Image (cartoon, rainbow, N blue to C red):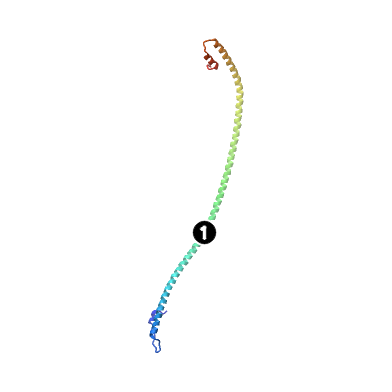
Amino acid sequence: MITPLDIQNKEFGRSVRGYKEEDVDGFLDLITLDLEKLIEENQRLKEQVKSFTSELDRYKKTENMVLETLEAAKALMGDISVSAEKRAEILLKNAELDAERITREARESVERLNEEAAVIRNRLNVFRTRYRTMLESELEKIDSLSSDLLFDRDLEDLKSILDVKEDTRILERESDFDKKTLLNIRTGDNL
C-alpha cells in the first residue's frame, strides 16, 4: 500500500514534453492529504470495528449466558414444578391417611363410649332393681313391725292411761301434792 510519505518522496523523471512540476506537486499534496485523512479514518473505523466486535462478542457471550440461564431456569422451574406436584401428592396422601386415622379413632371412641354407656345402663338397672327390692323388703319389714309396734303401743298407752288414772286418784286423796306435780306426772315428765 502506498503511504502519504511515499507520495511526497516520489520523484518523477523529466521529459521534454512533461507536465508542469508545480501542478503535479500541488496535486500530489492534495492526494497526500486526502490519503492521510482516509488512512486515519480507516484506522479509526478499524478501531471502532474492533470495539464493536469486542462488544458484540461480549453481548453474544452475555446472550449465551442469558439463554443458558433461561434454560437452567426453565429446567429448574420444571424440577420445582415436578417436586411441588410430588410434594402436593404426598401431602394429600398424608392428609387422607390422617383423615382415615382420625375417622377410625373417632369410630372406635364412639363404639367404646357406647359400650361404656351400655355397661353403665346395665349397672344402673341392676342398682335400681336391687334398691327397689331392698326398699320393698324394708317397707314390708316396717309394715309388719309397725303393726306389731302399734298393737304393743296401744296396750302400753292403755296401761299408762290406767296407771295415770290410778295415780290421779291416789294423788287426789293426798293433799300434799300440788297441781303442778300432778300435771308433771300426767304428762310423763317424771317417768
Rendered view: 28 above or below 109: below
Q: Residue at x 58, y 42 (%)?
A: 110
Left or right of 32 in this view: 161: right
Percent coordinates x, y for residue 79 in the rendering: 52, 58
- The count of marks equals 1
Q: Quadrant of the N terminus?
A: bottom left
Mark 1 = which residue? 77
Displayed quadrant of residue 129:
top right
Q: Amino acid at mark 1?
A: Met
Q: Is residue 9 above or below residue 140?
A: below
Report whether 61 appears left or right of 138: left
Location of residue 183 with respect to 34 vertically, above or below: above
Which residue occupies the extreme bottom position in the image? 16
Q: Position of residue 37 (x, y in %)?
A: 41, 76
Residue at 58 percent of width and 15 percent of height:
161
Give the residue displayed 60% in from the left and 21% down from the top: 150
- Residue 43's image quarter? bottom left
Of residues 13 and 37, which is closer to you in this image? 37
Q: Position of residue 128 (x, y in %)?
A: 60, 32
Residue 67: x and y in percent read: 50, 64
Residue nearest the viewer, comparing 37 with 133 = 37
Label 1, residues with CA under 10 Å away: few <14, some 14-19, many ≥20: few
User: Secondary structure under badge 1?
Assistant: helix
